[in-house]
């Protein structure tokens, strides 16, 4: 399959090239030249890995420089097994009540949904490097506010010909998140605390990507910088799979017949997860409405309802931090599709966004968007009260991101009375966000020690703690380096053993 740019500014490339490049060098995102059609009845009775193969092969094969079927199967085998996931179903679908199902996307190594993509993407990446004849070792640089860092570390851990370096704001992530990262083993993993906040880390990494002199320096020593961020097609594609999977489970459960419609509700930040659902629809999955759930950073739900994307607004830190985003990068792909693949429109809107921090789509685009998407948001109080209600009404524990989804679904139901069966994406284990869940259930503030909160939550609810969170306290802390922002390049040199000035590293012991 060949990939084209949403801004019409790049010659079509093969899948392996699109995955290596991540984004279009001159701006824009790669999208498949055409969207394949999947016959649902062909998927009947298949397990998760088989469904993954049937969906993904359409996008990754075709030419000599694409993947072979065996390579795709191998990548799937390495990613979706019971060593990495705590269930062979990979993404179990739980029935809450008639016509209301929750798709649990957090059974991977880090207990949040980014694992589904980041467990397989590194394998696709390494194969792509081989196919494209890249001889250099890839150095993946990641700035994280907590979740993505650990998911990327687990994904790239011990993957040949790669190193991964994660920068996180020291003191700016939760105890669980910090321990998850600093206890990561593996021969090629590096975790560095930075004195600064997440924006500082992010800006620092972006500067390194733009520093051609430094890139040249590491290149002479046989290294090449890369990123693993969510606009890479290799991260989006694995997410299309679980929508087909969930539909098959609904049929097995007797909730639908082949061809019946479903609604899908997704707690949304960067618009990646919900975009995958839209692609599934375009490939033949009978989806009636995509319900886009935002938290108080409701830039997307405002956009859906008004046609104006306005990122010039107050930023809130919420109970659902992985959705605290004002620029939803993957929206560009959706706008490209919804405007019948018109790069001129995309260029205009994104130039406006850069210049004025906002853009407005035309009436006909707005109408089309509203036909596909319902958008609304949940306040902080509503988020907590949904956690409580789901637990006391259905004995089912959800995290704050999932709670945002539940709340917005209720608003959709109240407005439309549309009782089409629902698949709601649950994006994190409740034990990953202990403090908010504890507050929701007890009405009290959580303990300073997050592990105390976690174990008391477990006592109150009896809900199973994912093994990889439970044993976190017993793991040895491996990574103890904290640096100042100005020391970033030197620490990279040191990791790559390419010299550099003597470093005075601060070791923080906890
Ligand atoms: C990343 C993330 C989201 C948002 O997903 P997008 O693909 O960015 O829309 C929601 N919930 C959790 C827990 C996440 O980590």
Image (cartoon, rainbow, N blue to C red):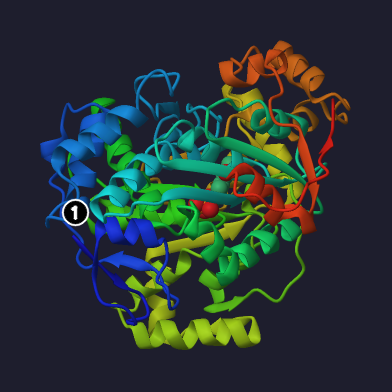
Residue in the foreground of this view, choosing between 506 and 29: 506
Vertical order, 284 against 148 (above or below): below
Residue in the foreground of this view, choosing between 80 and 305: 80
Task: Give the image quarter of residue 190.
Answer: top right
SS at badge 1: loop
Residue at position x 18%, y 56% in the image: 65
Asked if residue 130 lies left or right of residue 431, the reply is left
Residue at position x 48%, y 59% in the image: 219
Q: Residues within 10 Å of mark 1 (few under 14, many from 20)?
A: many
User: Is the CB of mark 1 within 8 Å of ligand 1?
Assistant: no
Q: Assign the C terminus to one quadrant of the image.
A: top right
Asked if residue 486 lies left or right of residue 112, the reply is right
Residue 143: x %, y % from top left: 64, 52
Asked if residue 410 lies left or right of residue 341, the reply is right
Q: Assign the N terminus to one quadrant of the image.
A: bottom left
Residue at position x 46%, y 63% in the image: 330
Residue 244: x %, y % from top left: 27, 41
Vertical order, 108 against 402 (above or below): above
Residue 55: x %, y % from top left: 22, 44
Residue 350: x %, y % from top left: 51, 81
The residue indicated by pointer 1 is: 66
Does residue 142 appear anywhere in the picture? Answer: yes
Does residue 257 appear anywhere in the picture? Answer: no
Task: Give the image quarter of residue 326.
Answer: bottom right
Residue at position x 71%, y 28% in the image: 179
Asked if residue 434 lies left or right of residue 409, the reply is right
Residue in the foreground of this view, choosing between 268 and 78: 78
């Amino acid at each position: 399959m060949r990939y084209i740019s949403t801004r019409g500014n790049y010659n079509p490339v093969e899948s392996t090239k699109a995955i290596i490049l991540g984004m279009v060098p001159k701006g824009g995102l790669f999208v498949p030249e055409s969207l394949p059609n999947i016959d649902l009845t062909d998927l009947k009775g298949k397990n998760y890995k088989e469904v993954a193969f049937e969906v993904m092969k359409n996008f990754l094969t075709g030419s000599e420089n694409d993947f072979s079927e065996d390579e795709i199967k191998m990548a799937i085998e390495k990613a979706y097994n019971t060593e990495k996931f705590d269930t062979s179903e990979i993404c179990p679908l739980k029935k809450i009540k008639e016509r209301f199902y929750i798709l649990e996307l957090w059974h991977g190594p880090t207990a949040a949904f980014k694992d589904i993509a980041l467990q397989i993407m590194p394998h696709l990446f390494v194969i792509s490097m081989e196919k494209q004849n890249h001889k250099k070792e890839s150095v993946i640089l990641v700035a994280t506010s907590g979740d993505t860092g650990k998911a990327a570390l687990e994904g790239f851990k011990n993957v040949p010909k790669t190193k991964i370096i994660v920068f996180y704001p020291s003191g700016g992530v939760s105890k669980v998140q910090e321990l998850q990262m600093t206890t990561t083993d593996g021969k090629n993993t590096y975790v560095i605390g930075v004195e600064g906040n997440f924006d500082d880390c992010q800006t620092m990494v972006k500067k390194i990507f733009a520093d051609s002199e430094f890139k040249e320096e590491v290149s002479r020593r046989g290294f090449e910088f890369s990123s693993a961020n969510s606009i890479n097609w290799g991260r989006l594609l694995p997410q299309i799979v679980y929508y087909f999977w969930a539909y098959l489970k609904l049929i097995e459960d007797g909730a639908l017949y082949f061809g019946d419609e479903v609604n899908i509700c997704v707690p949304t930040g960067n618009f990646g997860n919900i975009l995958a659902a839209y692609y599934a629809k375009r490939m033949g999955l009978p989806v009636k409405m995509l319900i886009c759930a935002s938290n108080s950073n409701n830039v997307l739900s405002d956009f859906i309802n008004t046609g104006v994307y306005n990122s010039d607004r107050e930023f809130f830190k919420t109970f659902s931090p992985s959705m605290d985003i004002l620029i939803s990068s993957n929206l560009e792909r959706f706008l490209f599709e919804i405007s019948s693949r018109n790069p001129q429109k995309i260029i205009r809107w994104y130039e406006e966004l850069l210049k004025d921090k906002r853009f407005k789509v035309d009436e006909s685009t707005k109408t089309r968007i509203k036909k596909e998407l319902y958008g609304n948001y949940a306040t902080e109080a509503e988020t907590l009260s949904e956690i409580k209600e789901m637990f006391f009404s259905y004995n089912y524990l959800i995290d704050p991101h999932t709670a945002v989804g539940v709340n917005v679904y209720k608003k959709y139901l109240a407005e439309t009375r549309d009782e089409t069966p629902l698949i709601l994406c649950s994006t994190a284990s409740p034990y990953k966000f202990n403090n908010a869940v504890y507050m929701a259930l007890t009405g009290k503030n959580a303990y300073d020690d997050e592990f105390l909160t976690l174990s008391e939550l477990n006592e109150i609810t009896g809900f199973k703690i994912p093994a990889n969170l439970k044993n976190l306290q017993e793991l040895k802390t491996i990574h103890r380096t904290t640096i100042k922002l100005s020391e970033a390049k030197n620490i990279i040199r040191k990791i790559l053993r390419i010299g550099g000035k003597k470093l005075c590293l601060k070791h923080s012991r906890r």
